[in-house]
Amino acid sequence: MADGLLGGIADAMASMAVAVCVIVAAPVAAADPLPPMPPDQNQLPNLPRESDLYKFLPVADPRTDPWYSQPADLDAMANGQIVRTRDVGTYLTGIPMPLTTRQILFRTTDLHDNPTVTATTVLIPPVPWIGSPRPILSYQEAIDSSSGICNPSFTLRAGIFKEIALLTPFLIQGFAVVVTDFDGVDASQMLTFGEGRMALDGIRAAKNDPGLGLAESAVGLYGYSGGGSGTSRAAEMHRSYAPELNIVGSAQGGVPGDMVQIARRNVTHDAGIANFTGPGNFTLWLVLANLTKTYPDVFDPQRLFTTEGQELLNNIQGRCIWTSAASGAYRPVNSYLKPGIALEDPEIQRVLVEQSLGQPQNLPGMPVFMWHGIWDELLPFPESIQSTVDKYWDGGVDLRYYTMPIPEHVAADIAGLPAAVAWITAVLRGLPPGPRFRMGI
């Protein structure tokens, strides 16, 4: 009897499972507007965007929040000049954090010297600082998005800032942490030197606020991956764009240095053990989504992509990193290029070279600490970084660089955190940066 009862339960559960699969799978497949994928490519249907979910959060959407609006006299303002401020709360999944949080909307310029505004969020912990002005740690998050709703000025208030734990080592020491929307209010500056401009102007804005008392503060830069891009670009632009800032060091990991090589490796994919670029295909789609805004003539979707490619690129627009990664992984760009279009297109190459790190006129003038995982599936080693490191070393940059035998991009971030935090903390406290070195493969 027991066997019969168990067998009946098992049959019922199996029938329910089949029914659920039929109910769930049918509408999902029907709702996918993208063309059928080859069997070695991403099979996911069209996913909802983060904005479809974030609208339920009790925080105003930056795309409609009037606080982000540009002033009429923007042309007459200086870079880093404050447009308006507000005091807000910083939250961790709805739990308020014991911080003084001031947001500053400020004037800056984009990659093409057009005046615009973006925001920075200044976090002041309740930890006294004695003996010198409270240091500033400019923390560049890996925003990695194509929408302003993904920017830290929104996610810190909404309690969904994904790198909040990585800020803790700096806050508990008493540093003022400046977190800037360095890709711009429309996220169009991703992996360009516009990021460096906006990060530096965010520091200027924090120093320009008399209520924060940071005018004389020393500054350190920190970021990994997409944040490493903003950090390294701010470090490279410091001497030419904001030489008055006392930046004493830059800690940057997982840096996307050579844009030509990064694009070349991520155009195709190989699911083999020796090449992990398949999961990383989404990074190039995300970058392309933003380059269509920054260089609309060079990266014209109708010129470059098939109809299916244009649909996929449009699908990536307006997404944060979470659904961009799911949507673009294992969808190699070369499968969607029009015949005769390739990365070797002269105009594409020109942009990629211009936005690569390590150009002689941009070498950092402050001490630099860098690290990279040797099995990084998003920013493949050594192609994405080695030429930058060589240019830094040969150009006399005060560099400390090492590679890590870590088999995943985010894992290398966490593994490198203790040494990077210790180093940037030391230089912010006035200790010497230590000798130059480059170690590893």
Image (tube, grey):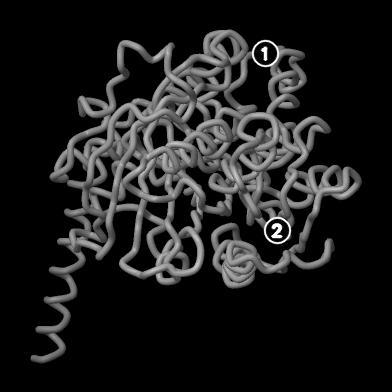
Residue closest to the far bottom: 2
User: Which percent across, then down, holds residue 78?
Assistant: 47, 22
User: Which percent across, then down, holds residue 268?
Assistant: 67, 36
Residue closest to the far right: 394
The vertical placement of 67 against 351, above or below, is below
User: Which percent across, then down, holds residue 372?
Assistant: 69, 58
Within 10 angstroms of label 1, few (less than 14), some, or many (20 or more) residues?
Answer: few
Residue 327, visible in the rendered structure: no
The vertical placement of 324 against 352, above or below, is below
Q: Helix, strand or loop at disc 1?
A: loop
Residue found at x 30% / y 50%? 156
| Amino acid of disc 2 | Phe
| Left or right for 51, reference 311 | left
Q: Quadrant of the N terminus?
A: bottom left
Task: Please report whichever mark, 2 or 1, sits nearer to the chain's N-terminal start.
Answer: 1
Residue 68, visible in the rendered structure: yes
Q: How far apart are marks 2 and 1 (CA)?
A: 43 Å
| Amino acid of disc 1 | Pro
12 and 64: which is toward the camera? 64
Instruction: Write down the residue under mark 1.
Output: 339
353 and 126: which is toward the camera? 126
311 and 299: which is toward the camera? 299
Q: Quadrant of the C terminus?
A: bottom right
Q: Are marks 2 and 1 in contact (CB under 8 Å)?
A: no
Q: Helix, strand or loop at disc 2?
A: strand
Disc tally is 2
Instruction: Write down the residue under mark 2.
Output: 369
User: Which percent across, then down, holds residue 138?
Assistant: 50, 50
